[in-house]
Image (cartoon, rainbow, N blue to C red):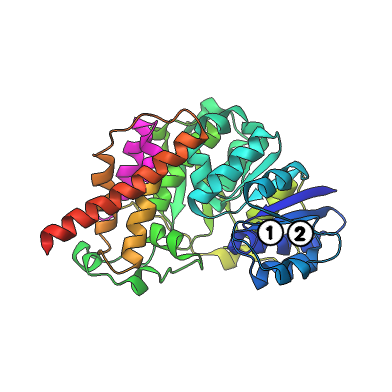
Amino acid sequence: MIRLAVLGSTGSVGTQTLEVAEKFPEEVKVSALLARRASDKLLQQALKFKPELVVTYEEPSSEWVSSLPEGCEYMHGDEGLEKAVSISDKVMNAVAGVHGIKPAYVTLQKGKTLLASNKESVICLGDLVRKNRDRVIPVDSEHNALFQLLDGVDREDVRFVYLTASGGPFKDWSLEDMRRAKVEEALNHPRWSMGSKITIDSATMMNKGFEMLEAMNLFDLRLESIKVVIHPQSVVHGVVELIDGSFLMHASQTDMKVPIMHALFYPDRKRYPFGRVTLPRLSPMSFEEVDTDKFRALYLARWAGEMGGVYIPVLLGADEEAVALFLEGKVGFLDIVDLVEKTLSSVNIRDPQDIEGILEAVEWGRRKVREIYESEHAEAV
C-alpha cells in the first residue's frame, strides 16, 4: 500500500492525482492533503479520501475544521507540511510556482520519494535533486517521457534530447501582432487547460526554458544537448536522438493522468483505467523549428542555466512578477521577457547557500521587476 501525500491537491495536477488514486483503492492510501486555502473543494476531497491529515497555509474557520471527517487532523503551515511528508511514502508535489520549492526540499531532506510536478523546485534545488536522483520521479509529461526513454539506453549513446512544445497561442503570429496581444488571447492555449501563470509561460515559451533547466538537473545532461521543437499535436512528449541516427519517441494521449500513473507506481505499470486511445487517433504528427526571434525566453533561460547560481532563482522570481504585471494589464506581452532580461542584467547579489537564500533570491527577482516597471512607468508619465 502506497501512502501518498498530495500537495497542491486542489490544482489541476493534484486533482488528477486523486482521480488516479481513486481507481486503485487497494494500492494507494491518500495520507495527507495540502492546499493554500481552506476551500470547499479541499473539504470535499478530505471527506471523500479521509486522509489522516489536512494542511492549509491560510487559516480556516473553526466551522471548516469541524467539518473534516472523523480521525482527520488539521495542521497549519510549514509544521503541517513537515508532518504530511513524514507520514507518507511518496509525495506528489503539485504546488504551483515558487511555493513548491520548500515542499520539494522537505520531501528530499526526509528521504521520501518525490513525484515532481513543480518545475521551480527541480530548477532551484539542482544540487539536492542530483544527489537524490533515485528518489525523484518526474511527473510533467515531457520529463516523464524522457525519464522512460533514457531508462532504456546507455547515456554515452545519447546525442540530443528533445522537449516538445505546442507553440502556444502565438505560434503563427508575427512579432508585431504579439506586441499587441491581449491577456485573453495569451490565455487561450490551443491544447491544455492550466492555471493563468503557466498558460502565459507557455505563450512566451518560458515554460520550455524552465523545462530545459529541469532536464539538466533530472538527467544530468549538458544544456547544449537539450533541444526544444514545436509539435502542435502534443502527443509526442519527449524524443531521444541516439548517435547511430535513431530517434526514440514517447507518445500518448494529451492526458496528465498518464504520466501521473507512471510516476506513482514506478517501476511497476498499471492498466490505464480511463479509456484507451488507438494509434491512428494520435495522428498526424509534425515537428517544427522554434522561431527564437519570437520566443526569446528560451535564450534567457539557457543563459541563466549556463550562469547558474543566483541567476536561476532570480529568473523564476522575475518571470512570476513580469507575468503578474501582464495579467494585471500593466505591461504588454513582449514586455514580460524584456523585464526578465533587464532583471537578469541587474543581478548584484550572491549565490544562495541554503533554502532560505534561494527563496530570498526569488523574492529579489520579483522586487527588481516591480522596481524596473515603476521606474519606467514614472519616466513615461
In the image shown, does 63 or 267 lie closer to the viewer? 63
At mark 1, the secondary structure is helix
At mark 2, the secondary structure is helix
Residue 86, picture quadrant: top right
Please rate how many residues cluster around mark 2, counting C-alpha atoms within 10 Å: few if below 14, some from 14 to 19, many from 20: many
Residue under label 2, please give it: 21
- Which region is colored magenta? 294-315
Q: Mark 1–mark 2 contact, CB under 8 Å? A: yes
Say what amino acid the circle numbered 2 marks. Answer: Ala
Position of 301 with respect to 120 (left or right) is left
Residue 279, picture quadrant: bottom right
Q: Quadrant of the C terminus?
A: bottom left
Q: At 68% across and 59% down in the image, what residue appears?
A: 17
Q: Position of residue 93 (x, y in %)?
A: 62, 49
Q: Is residue 347 above or below residue 255?
A: above
Q: Position of residue 114 (x, y in %)?
A: 66, 42
Residue under label 1, please give it: 17
Q: Is residue 307 magenta?
A: yes
Say what amino acid the circle numbered 1 marks. Answer: Thr
